[in-house]
Image (cartoon, grey):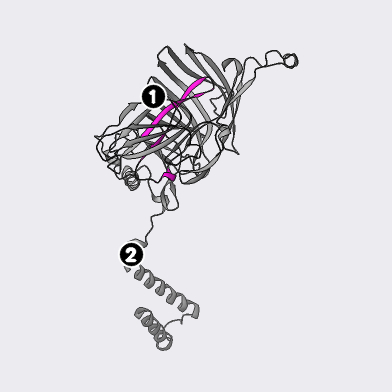
Amino acid sequence: MKKIIGLVLILILLLGGCAAKETPKTEDELKAEIRAEMEAEAKKEAENTDSSMDEIQVPSALIDIRDQTVLMDFIKTLYPNVENYPEMFVKYHDFTQDGIEDVVCYFDYRFEIAKPIFITVGAEGLQVVSNDLAFQYTQDVTFDETFIYYTITGGGSGIADEVMEICVFDGEKIVKTGAVLEIKGHSAGQGFSVERVGETTFLKSDKDYSHFSHVERQTGSETYEIRKEYTYVPEEYKFEIVEITSDQVSDDSVSSNENIKTEYDVSLVQFKNETLFSEDETFDIDYSKYSLVLIPSQVSVNSKGLETRTIDVTSTGNESEYTFTVLGKMIGAKIIYMENGLDPECKPVETTISDDLENVVVTLNAALPYDGSYIAVEGLYQYQSGIEGPIGVSFDDMRDPTSLKIATVDGYSFPNEDY
């Protein structure tokens, strides 16, 4: 400001004492010079100001999502032990379709990360896009301009399947579209051995998953063939799925009551409906809609009168009880015990349950000494003419019972000759 005052004094002297020697400046010219000096002074003061780093926000446009250091630092805020995990797969794609590249990161082993991590660049920096995907053994994520393809492998004792689930970004999160396609699989046990394979036929000239048909065939000691046509409904982020049969019943055959198949509903109508909690949200259970329901930790109103069973998982002397209810039939179940999932040297211990779990309350006695300790029960289930899965529940000491997930299988119908 001292410079500005000095300039004003000089200008006054010029106007008064030097008027005879120089052409006097106009008032506008004087104002312009003063304004320029003030702006220069203000700029210099701003440059010399020591701004607090806490007030500086890096614009999201300046974040390089391909910078592995930036990416890993962000993931470490979510999973501090990520460096102890096996190789992380990283794939880039604008799955949010906002013109800015996104990324998905995932592993082939569970540890504490049992699903892919979808990350986008938001207004305040890197942000996680939520999803409810999960895998058992291996997982892979691929993209096209519309869909996210989630390919996983899973199974159990004598059973293995590889399936592809089609997902999409709905503007807020990654959601399932309802299309789950068998790629290949097999099952074997006492007295039977089968192989499964899936085949997709696109109903447009290009490879377009918005409209296609898929056939799943099983060969071996038990055979079936299921054909379905899939049409994507973008307004609902869902596929319309229609099963195609080779023996469609004509009007004449219906009128003569020939070739009519009576359908039997498989559901848990014998149980009383109830409201419990699943992942911290209320869950209304209408048992007429399900063929299998697994309830971890919470007590069902239908527990009274069910068979009870206790299984000792560990014998350290520090065991706690972890109880779950099976309404319906769980096939070939196994217990997976992880003493410490945060220790990369620790491996899960699996124990096969000798018989099926059907309409039973099961209590597991197990010691979970660490934050990364957990126990899970997984099995298969009957769905129409095939065996599918896995399905299961898990326990740890970090979550409340209401935070655990209730697992369900939809009810279905089957023809009388298969009853």
* Dominant secondary structure, magenta: strand
Q: Tell which tag, 2 or 1, sits nearer the viewer.
A: 1
| Front one among 301 and 180 | 301
Q: Residues within 10 Å of mark 1 (few under 14, many from 20)?
A: some
**Horizontal arrangement in the rendering, residue 2 relative to residue 150 (left or right):** left
Q: Which residue is found at the position 35% from the left and 69% from the top?
A: 44
Residue 182 in the image: state x and y as whole percent.
Answer: 48, 23
Q: Which residue is mark 1?
A: 156
| Vertical comparison of 244 with 308: above or below | above
Amino acid found under the numbered disc labelled 2: Ser
Of the 4 image quadrants, the one containing the N terminus is bottom left
Residue 354 in the image: state x and y as whole percent.
Answer: 37, 23
Badge 2 marks a residue whose secondary structure is: loop
| Vertical comparison of 392 with 79: above or below | above
Residue 335 in the image: state x and y as whole percent.
Answer: 35, 30
Q: Which residues are magenta?
A: 376-403
